[in-house]
Amino acid sequence: MAKSVRMADVAAKVGVSIVSVSKALAGKEGVGDEMRAKILAAAEELGYRSPSAKAALTQGNGGQIIGVLVADHFFDESAFYSNLYRALLRCSAPQGISVAMEIVSPQAEFGCIMPTFLVNRKVDGLIFMGEIDRRYMAAAAQSGLPFLQLDFYDDTITADCVLSDNVSGAYQLTETILRTGRSKIAFLGSVNATSCIMDRYLGYTKALLCAGIEPRADWRLEDRGEDGRFTPIRLPEDMPEAFVCSCDEVAYNLVETLRRKGIRVPEDVAVAGYNDFRYSTICDPPLTSYRVDVEGMAAAAVDQMRRKMAHKTSIATTVMVPGALVVRESTK
C-alpha cells in the first residue's frame, strides 16, 4: 500500500513548519500569499489530501474531483489567483468535492503536455483558471471531461465560463474619475493579453464615449510582454490627468513610478486599479479599485461544475458575477 502523504511531508518539501502548512491549506491568516502558493503547489504535487477530503471520497454522492489548471506566470505573479483557488477549496469541500491543482509550466503549456491527473483520468472535470494557451485548452478538452473557463473566456471555444463583470467595473472606475473633473484619462493594460483586460478597456472606452470624449490611441499603454509577465511602465510623453489600470498590482507599480519622477497621486495624477486585493490597501495612497467577488465566482464555478459532472444542463453558459466599486484616496 502506498504511504499516505502527511502535512509533515509537505512542510519538509517547502521548508516551513507544519503550522504554516495547516494555515495555508485551511486558507487562514498568518501565511504570505507567495508562501501559501508554494505550499498549495507542493501539496498537490505530493498528492496530499486532507482528512475531510479523504472522507468525502468514500461517500456515495461525493468523491468527485475537479482538476484546476492555471498557467505558471499567472499563479507566480498574481496573488489574486491563489486567493481564487482557496475560494474554490472552501466552496467545494461542503459538497464533498475535492480540488486538485496543476500549475502549468510554459514548457507544458506550449508543448501541450497534459498533467498526470488528466492523463490517468484521476479527475471528473476541469476548470481552466485564468487565460491559458488555446491549443493547450483544446488538447485538454479532448479528454471528453466537462470543463469551464474561470475568470476568462475564449470566443473561439464553446465553453461555460464564470467572469467578473469587467466591462461594468472599468466603466464605473472611469466614470468615478470623470466626476472629479478629470477628462484626460489613459488606460494602462495590454488589451490583447487576456479577455479580462480587453473587457476592462471596453468599459473604460464606453465611459469616455458616453462623456463625449474620444479615447486616444497613445494613451492605451502596455503593462506586460508577450509571455504575459509584467514589464517596466513607460509613461507617455503627453501625460494624462488620470490612469485606469488593468489590475491593482499594475496600479501600485504605476504609483511608485510616478513618485520616482516627482509626480504626486492624486494631486497631479489620479490612479485606479482593479480587483481590490492586497495592493489596493498597501499602496500609498490607497487605491480606488473595483472589488471582484472572489467567493461568488468560486461558488458559481463549483456549482456549474457540479451540474456538468452530473450531466445536467447549465443554468447559464456564462455567469457574470458583479463586484463593487471601492473609492479611496488615489482618485480624490
Image (tube, grey):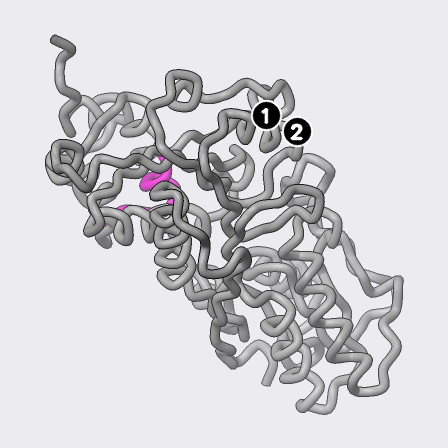
Residue at horizontal 40%, vertical 58%? 300
Q: Which residue is mark 2?
A: 135
Residue range in magenta is 30-38
Dot 1 falls on a residue whose secondary structure is: helix
Percent x, y of residue 275: 51, 63
Percent x, y of residue 210: 78, 84
Q: Please give the count of numbered marks on the rendered protein.
A: 2
Percent x, y of residue 311: 39, 43
Q: Main secondary structure of the magenta part?
A: helix
The quadrant holding residue 54 is top left
As for residue 50 lying within the magenta part, the answer is no
Could you tell whether 129 is left or right of 256 in the image?
left
The quadrant holding residue 183 is bottom right
Which amino acid is tagged 1?
Answer: Ala
Residue at horizontal 67%, vertical 90%? 180
Q: Nearer the viewer, residue 119 or 218?
A: 119
Percent x, y of residue 217: 88, 63
Dot 2 falls on a residue whose secondary structure is: helix
Which amino acid is tagged 2?
Answer: Arg
Which mark, by number, is residue 275? none
Residues at marks 1 and 2 touching, judged by CB atoms closer than 8 Å: yes
Q: Is residue 205 above or below residue 190?
A: below
Residue at horizontal 75%, vertical 76%? 206
Could you tell whether 100 is left or right of 235 in the image?
left
Q: Which residue is mark 1?
A: 139
